[in-house]
Image (spheres, rainbow, N blue to C red):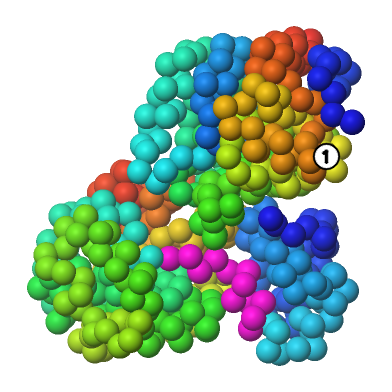
């Protein structure tokens, strides 16, 4: 069952990778989340849907501006994931996580009319990280990411969706609910608390 | 929805790759795993094959392997992809190439040829196609057949027109093809300057000396080991002061290789061999 309670420390202990997918309406939540990621002890990866024309340097810049105490960068092929870093999928490439926690880019067909696709990132993160993976699916108007979230859950990882009631476009989290892909359904403020908690948990180990 | 009825582990992926190598001689062992695994499971789900059936068909059905090969290699390509790259080629590479009496170009991983024809058009507009020759190679014979024909969907070609104009195109893309119903066939003047043939970057060696090697969005599918091997192969294939063009996300970063090149365009990943 999908819970709305705070996530217990024990569930956060194994987490070594955070993957976040968002589409329409997710920027507001992500900008809020940026407050809680200073010196974040494990790598975070974002896939955010956007038009082909939007300039990525700018988007990374926007996030970086929101918090100087974490590195924000466009993911490069074959670079190894590092803590205290947020990786953004480059425009028009799928982004995948390899078993050795390095990153790969892929130009294959769009998924859900999207490249980068959240499903592609999540499925590879599930494969690569298993129970060490935390997947978070935010506001969006399609179902990209649902299948991937389910994979993360199947492989023993932890899955969270943004509470659809708080989402500007609830389709994405709702589809995840329907597919029983989510362990937790959280409001943005609870999501922030989870990040603070995750930080404490990881710093103590 | 991505179907996920059939799944394989990384160990099973390795088994499949080793089988392919043994039976068909294609070496995929040094491809980046995550993307390759995704493509293999995609085929399994599309054709409703479990791993046992897949292995059986890979061994016993010759036609199936051709189809398999076509599906696991990524053949997404377009004409004048990344117009800024072609602009940079016009500005920074062509003036240099023009000084050679003969220009040989290798487009490695050319897929169905869109990139090769984009180069041919660029060379023509810069007045050096006459003394140039373009070799397009790929691992996949089906896409090469398409490249040889030089026939593409008219709908797609029209989409490429914007790319072409943004790339510094001097006339109209429609000047280079003839329309037949819903397809466009590129001029024989362009086609006769190209030769498309099978070449496997994972196992084959160089076949000529080139003034320019273009290999875009191919290295992203290889692991670090194969990536370096292929870059070494390109280095050996380039003449002194020859150019290497990689994809916009494929930076030359291996220090041993980097010291053999001058960076011509950091953003578009254009390099010139200096040793």
Q: Can residue A203 be seen here?
A: no
Q: Position of residue B130 (x, y in %)?
A: 14, 82
Observer-nearest of A171 and A64: A171
- The magenta stretch spans residue B67: yes
Q: Can residue B247 be seen here?
A: yes
Task: Give the magenta-colored segment's residue range.
Answer: B66-77
Q: Position of residue B131 (x, y in %)?
A: 16, 80
Quadrant in which the N terminus of chain A appears: top right
Give the side of residue B127 with respect to residue B232, left or right.
Answer: left
Going 49% across and 79% down the picture, which residue do you hit?
Answer: B143
Q: Position of residue A21 (x, y in %)?
A: 61, 35
- The secondary element bearing badge 1 is classed as loop
Going 49% across and 61% down the picture, which residue do you hit?
Answer: B218
User: Vertically, is A64 above or below A144?
Assistant: above
Q: Find disc 1 in the rendering and name its residue.
A: A180
Give the side of residue B133 with respect to residue A10, left or right.
Answer: left
Give the quadrant of residue A172.
top right
> Which chain does tag 1 point to?
A
Task: Check disc 1: other Cα within 10 Å, few if <14, some if 14-19, many if 20+.
Answer: some
> Residue lying furthest front in this view?
A165
- The magenta stretch spans residue B185: no
């Amino acid at each position: 069952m999908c819970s709305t309670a705070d996530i217990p420390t024990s569930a956060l202990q194994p987490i070594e990778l955070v993957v976040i997918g968002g589409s329409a309406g997710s920027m507001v939540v992500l900008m809020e989340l940026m407050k809680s990621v200073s010196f974040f002890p494990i790598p975070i990866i974002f896939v955010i849907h956007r038009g082909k024309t939007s300039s990525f340097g700018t988007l990374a810049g926007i996030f970086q501006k929101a918090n100087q105490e974490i590195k924000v960068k466009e993911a490069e092929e074959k670079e190894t994931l590092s803590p205290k870093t947020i990786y953004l999928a480059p425009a028009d490439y799928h982004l995948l996580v390899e078993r050795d926690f390095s990153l790969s880019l892929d130009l294959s067909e769009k998924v859900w009319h999207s490249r980068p696709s959240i499903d592609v990132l999540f499925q590879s993160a599930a494969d690569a990280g298993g129970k060490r993976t935390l997947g978070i699916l935010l506001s969006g108007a399609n179902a990209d990411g649902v299948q991937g979230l389910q994979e993360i859950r199947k492989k023993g990882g932890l899955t969270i969706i943004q509470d659809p009631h708080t989402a500007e476009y609830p389709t994405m989290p709702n589809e995840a609910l329907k597919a029983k892909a989510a362990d937790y359904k959280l409001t943005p403020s609870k999501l922030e608390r989870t990040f603070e908690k995750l930080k404490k948990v990881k710093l103590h180990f | 929805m991505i179907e996920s009825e059939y799944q394989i582990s990384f160990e099973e992926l390795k088994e499949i790759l080793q089988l392919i190598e043994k039976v068909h001689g294609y070496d995929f062992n040094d491809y980046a795993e995550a993307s390759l695994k995704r493509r293999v499971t995609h085929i399994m789900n599309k054709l409703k094959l479990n791993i046992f059936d897949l292995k059986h068909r890979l061994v016993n059905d010759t036609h199936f392997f051709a189809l398999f090969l076509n599906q696991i290699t990524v053949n997404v390509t377009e004409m004048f992809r990344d117009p800024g790259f072609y602009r940079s080629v016009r500005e920074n590479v062509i003036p240099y190439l023009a000084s050679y009496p003969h220009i040989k170009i290798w487009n490695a991983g050319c897929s169905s040829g869109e990139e090769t024809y984009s180069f041919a058009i660029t060379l023509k507009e810069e007045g050096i196609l006459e003394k140039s020759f373009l070799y397009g190679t790929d691992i996949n014979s089906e896409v090469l057949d398409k490249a040889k024909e030089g026939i593409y969907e008219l709908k797609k070609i029209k989409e490429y027109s914007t790319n072409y104009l943004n790339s510094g195109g001097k006339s109209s893309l429609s000047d280079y093809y003839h329309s037949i119903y819903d397809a466009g066939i590129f001029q024989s003047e362009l086609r006769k300057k190209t030769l498309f043939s099978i070449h496997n970057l994972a196992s084959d060696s160089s076949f000529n000396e080139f003034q320019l090697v273009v290999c875009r969005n191919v290295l992203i599918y290889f692991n670090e080991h194969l990536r370096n091997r292929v870059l070494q192969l390109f280095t050996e294939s380039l003449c002194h002061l020859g150019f290497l063009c990689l994809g916009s996300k494929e930076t030359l970063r291996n220090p041993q290789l980097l010291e053999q090149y001058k960076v011509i365009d950091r953003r578009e990943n254009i390099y010139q061999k200096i040793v």
